[in-house]
Image (cartoon, rainbow, N blue to C red):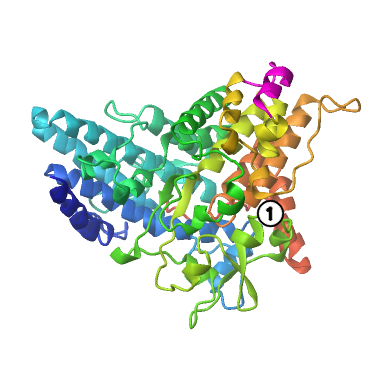
Amino acid sequence: MKKIFKNIVVVLMVFSFAGCENYFNTDPSDIINSEDYVSSQSEMYSGYLGIITKLQDVGDQLIFMSDIRADFMEPTADAPQDLWQLYQYNYSQTNEFADPVDIYAVIIACNDYLAKMFAYREEIGDAMDSATETNYKALISGTLRIKAWTYFQLAKQYGRAIYFDDPVTELKDVSDNAIFTELTSVEQIVDKCLDLIDNGVNGIDGTLEMNWGDWLDPENPTDGQYQHWQYITPDWLCLRCELLVTKNEGWAWIKDQILDRLLEAFYEDPYVYSLNAGWNSNYYRIFAEGTYYRRSAISSIIYDYTNNQTNDLITYFGKRYPAKYLIRPTSYATSKYSDSDRRGRYTNFLSQDGDTVIGKYHANYRWRQPYQSDASIPLYRGHDLHFWLAEAENHLGYWQPAGTLLNEGVAGRFPDQGEFDRNNDPDQWDARYRDFLLHRSYNNIGIEGVVNGDFFELPDPSAEDYDLTEAERIKAYDLALLDAMLLEFPAEGRVMGMLFRMANRYNDMSIIADRVVPKYPAGMQETIREKIMNGEFFIDWELGL
């Protein structure tokens, strides 16, 4: 049985991951192949993997289109004009990096797959065994999450989207209101995404997880050969947390869910998601392990060059002769890292042939393998949980744990467990934080502590001269968290969403401008600031309605 399942996996990876034209065309302006490919149990899985290939198509594009407009990246003299246009906040309808066609292709693939899965389920009725039924529901649930995650990317990049559930098996007029609905704000899109997760469709919500090991190799489901399959779908808890922080609500739910997730992980393996001293020498491995780094990875877009699955990250970020060097880190962004901060010259930027290049994803050994352009792109990783937990604590009024999670960590604040029991303020500290201290060799030393980063100076309500309102204090902590996010997450295609949620929360676009404009030459700064302040933050793309 084990050999049979491994052979099936090889077939699926060759035909589904490498090229899925049998299931989905690459261009959603064309008619989707409407053959009933979900006609047997194996095709339930191969059809799902076809959706994953669509995610691979958009992974690097989201990084280029997003971060070229944030603080960390700038184009080089050899970069194409389309990159320069995005960098300058100029938008044209022919810009290849701004074109959402591949993003909508993911949505079309999801809709097509869902329609055919439901038809298949109805056709076979009671013939589906219980194990397949479980997997069927999990695959539907995962598809709902991919669809929600994809719409959320449209929200963060364009601020609006066309929503539809139709499988679009033939060309249709996008102005047909019976099929297509324009969502005109981030808030509308976020609500639709939450609905997909919470309510789902046909009685299946977006919170179920597919156990790929049980299907791929039922005799050895934890075989390391297949572990990375567990990461290919956006995690439901992470996606829901990010949606809620964007809505500026659900703080108590976020806190409880993340504390439970972290403690569950700690007791299974004290390394996983635990920001401890071991990160000082291992931080780079988040991006250099190739497929995933178990201590950190939650969800990723995963590539495999042996199956012709690659991205353009090395091509754009590194000097690969005869290829051009297209995107580099800005001197403004690199100057924000202290010499001891391991996210700086150890990971986010490296020296190559006398120039500073973006080093994330490709440790030195990967620069020597130019064909291996298959670094995974994280969608969510362990640091996200700590950031959201700190953000939730802040908005719940618990400033001590919020600042502690950001800076020195629970173990840094309480050098021993007894000190936590004696000195913590029960009105501030949830008792579950005691478990952050249980594994003394792996204790929590904070977001900044694990990378030797500079601690943030935060208002202290216990100080004698403290004179802020609670709303002012919360905002100060939020902005510190935002600045830490800009240090932690550059070149991952996510910081523009983080910038917008804080600016939107406080109705102040200068929160974005103050952090992005300084990277530009002096002669451009006034123009870029004016564009951001005037609402030109989102990419302007004609949706055809």
Q: Residue at x 65, y 25 (%)?
A: 417
Q: Is residue 425 magenta?
A: yes
Q: Is residue 49 magenta?
A: no
Residue 397 shows in this picture: no
> Residue 364, percent across and down?
53, 68
Looking at numbered disc 1 in the image, what kind of residue is underneath it? Asp
**In the image shown, does 201 or 475 lie closer to the viewer?**
475
Instruction: Tell me the quarter of the picture where residue 143 sits.
Output: top left
Q: Residues within 10 Å of mark 1 (few under 14, many from 20)?
A: many
Element at label 1: loop
Q: Residue at x 32, y 60 (%)?
A: 27
**In the image shown, does 189 or 170 lie closer to the viewer?**
189
Q: Is residue 144 left or right of residue 338?
A: left
Q: Residue at x 30, y 37 (%)?
A: 210
> Residue 426, percent across and down?
69, 16
> Residue 537, percent across and down?
62, 52
Residue carrying label 1: 341
Q: Looking at the picture, does residue 529 appear above or below residue 448? A: below
Instruction: Magenta stretch: give its range.
Output: 416-430
